[in-house]
Image (cartoon, helix red, strand yellow):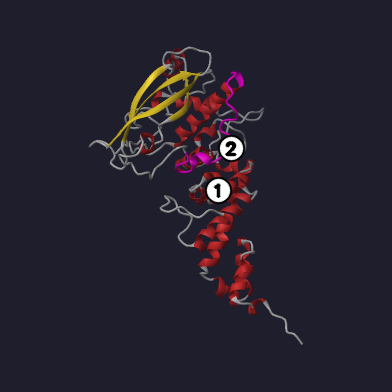
Amino acid sequence: MVSLCTLLDLPHELLHQILLNVDPADLARVRLTCSFLDRYLRKNELLFKELYLQLWDEPVENASVSIGLTWEKRLQNAVWLQKILASDHVDSKLNDYQQVVHFITALLQVKNPTKSKNLNFFDEAFDKVNLDTLLCRSSLFEQAGDVTHVPADTEFERQLSAKLHCYYGIPIDPRGRKSKPTHPWARSLVYDLRNYDTNTMWGPFRADGSGRVDWEKVEAIMIVLGFNLKVLVEESDIPLGTLWAVRFRGAVPYSAPHLKPTLDNGLDLPLELRDPYGVTGTWLRVVCFLDYHDFYAFNFGSIPPADGGPRPPIDIREAIRFIKLGITVTKVEPPGPDDGQALPVVHFRGASRLMHAFWDPNANSELTGESPLPK
């Protein structure tokens, strides 16, 4: 009589292969079945690594944000995030909002954005519920959006939401009878001169002089640019195709084309290969601006809100310039004493040309410049 072999009688190699076919979300239940499987799974880093890499990318070295220090922790955190994003319960997403954003940011750090399991996972996970709940919590949605868009209670989480919206890369600008578009309020934030002084370094930075990015301002800039590009596509005959339709890919480090961050800048290499910034090439530039009279009236035509709140929305159309740049590297030299020392200074020249019918001497010009690495 032949005796049957039980699961626990199998060699560890076969048990390992069987467990590789278990959904990682079910591993906790497997550990509860008996003490043997509990001991087998405890700190089984090889199994956890293989299970993790079946679904997600291998973490990049020296990542600024970590999904976990061990393979077991990485797997647990990724599965937790997967469950949160798959849930229809808004409260479950908001109760641990900071943790959700942390893990999303960690998984956005991938080596190859064109072949990324992480980014494919986010493509499927970010449905309308997650977009409304996670990306629409900045101050902008106090005035804009619809009933599903509720700003966060704290400035920190409002900044996190704006940052995640920017990482997402597609401006959320709802249109409909029961919603208010974001672009008029975003335009109001962008053109409000109160937001630009020495403390903000005249840019989209915090007003405390720390130099930290103000993600709500960057979010507003993205929305304004997105709206104007859409108008340009709809009203011109320029074959631009679909713009800003790819999610999250622009948030990946070194995702810009032609960037060569680790290339040796030896003197025997051609100029283009010694350029770590990838300057040489054809670039498209979009410039949007208010008419001077509208800009002046918006900032000085009325008394600003006493509480420092936002000015009224701007519904006036902006001027748009779509410009094509052709740039070539002319010289690469070592950094000077006032430059960052990690990369060389790249000098370039080129030309810019307007791509639609309006003539603008500022858009059609010759270019010269240099690209040092800031300290």
Residue at 48% over, 50% down: 106
- Whether the magenta-drawn stretch holds residue 205 is answered as no
Q: Is residue 313 left or right of residue 362?
A: right
Q: Which span is picked out in magenta? A: 234-255
> What is the C-alpha distance between the residues marked 1 and 2?
30 Å
Mark 1 — residue? 116
Observer-side mark, 1 or 2, equals 1
* SS at mark 2 in the image: loop
Q: Is residue 332 left or right of residue 60?
A: left
Q: Which mark is residue 149?
A: 2
The quadrant where residue 142 appears: top right
Q: Position of residue 301 (x, y in %)?
A: 43, 15
The numbered mark, 1 or 2, whose residue comes first in the sequence reads 1
Q: How many marks?
A: 2
Q: Amino acid at mark 2?
A: His
Is 279 above or below relative to 107?
above
Q: Position of residue 219 (x, y in %)?
A: 49, 34
Examine the rendering and report whether any part of residue 138 can be seen: yes
Is 209 above or below relative to 60?
above
Q: Amino acid at mark 1?
A: Ser
Is 351 above or below relative to 242?
above
The quadrant where residue 368 appears: top left
* SS at mark 1 in the image: loop
